Image (spheres, grey):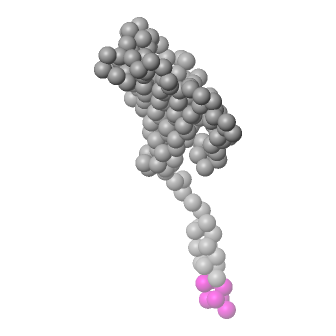
Amino acid sequence: MRGVSGILMVISLALILTGCQTEQPMSDTVEQIIYAANSGPVLPDLQWHEEIIIARDGVTLNRNGRVDNSQINAGSWTLPADTGALLGDLAAVNCADLKRVEPADPPDGGGTISYELIFTDGSRCVLTYDPGVTYTGGEAVTEPVQAFLRTLSWPAEAASRIK
């Protein structure tokens, strides 16, 4: 009997210990955020596209015009910035909970804005705001990104979209 109870105790202890988990590395860490905006329907020489790339090592603004003789202030500008808190906060966003809501009657005109979260495991979460589109829960992404962007001080040569 003593051998059986000893074996049961060892098995019980093994089962208890297998229930303990060590901390797993985060696979949902946000590595980069890309905020992109397009002008929408305006004269071709005033149409623009810009991306603001928020990464661990800083922030980059890339802007270009849509035609050769563009009046757009095109270029690329980089700023050092502490992005760790923003990237960490957005890691908590569950992209599966964000639902795109299309308008019944989309408005004419307007530009497009998108937010793309790129995770260290290669997965992506993209919210594309075409005219009239919303996302349920989308403010979990848009509000912190917009608040962060408002804190940035771009150089004078990057401030205006038009030359």
Closer to us: 25 or 89: 89
Q: Quadrant of residue 140?
A: top right
The residue that appears at 52% across and 33% down in the rendered structure is: 114
Q: Can you give x and y, in whole percent of width and height, for residue 30 in the image? A: 49, 40
The residue located at (64%, 45%) in the rendering is: 99
The outermost residue toward the bottom is 1
Residue drawn where x is 67% and y is 36% of the image: 105
Q: In this rendering, is residue 13 above or below 70?
A: below
Q: Is residue 40 above or below residue 122?
A: above
Image location (x, y in percent) of residue 4: 64, 89
Specify the segment rendered in magenta.
1-7
Q: Is residue 96 left or right of residue 149?
A: right
Residue 116 in the image: state x and y as whole percent.
49, 38
Q: Is residue 45 left or right of residue 148?
A: left
Judge by depth and name the residue closer to the eye, 83 or 139. Answer: 139
Q: Image quadrant for the C terminus?
A: top left
Is 2 magenta? The answer is yes
Residue 13: x percent and y percent? 62, 73
Q: Is residue 59 visible?
A: no
Q: How many marks?
A: 0
Query: Which picture quadrant has residue 130?
Result: top right
Q: Quadrant of the N terminus?
A: bottom right
The chief SS type of the magenta part is: helix
Is 81 magenta? The answer is no
Residue nearest the viewer, comparing 109 with 81: 109
Residue 36 visible in image: yes
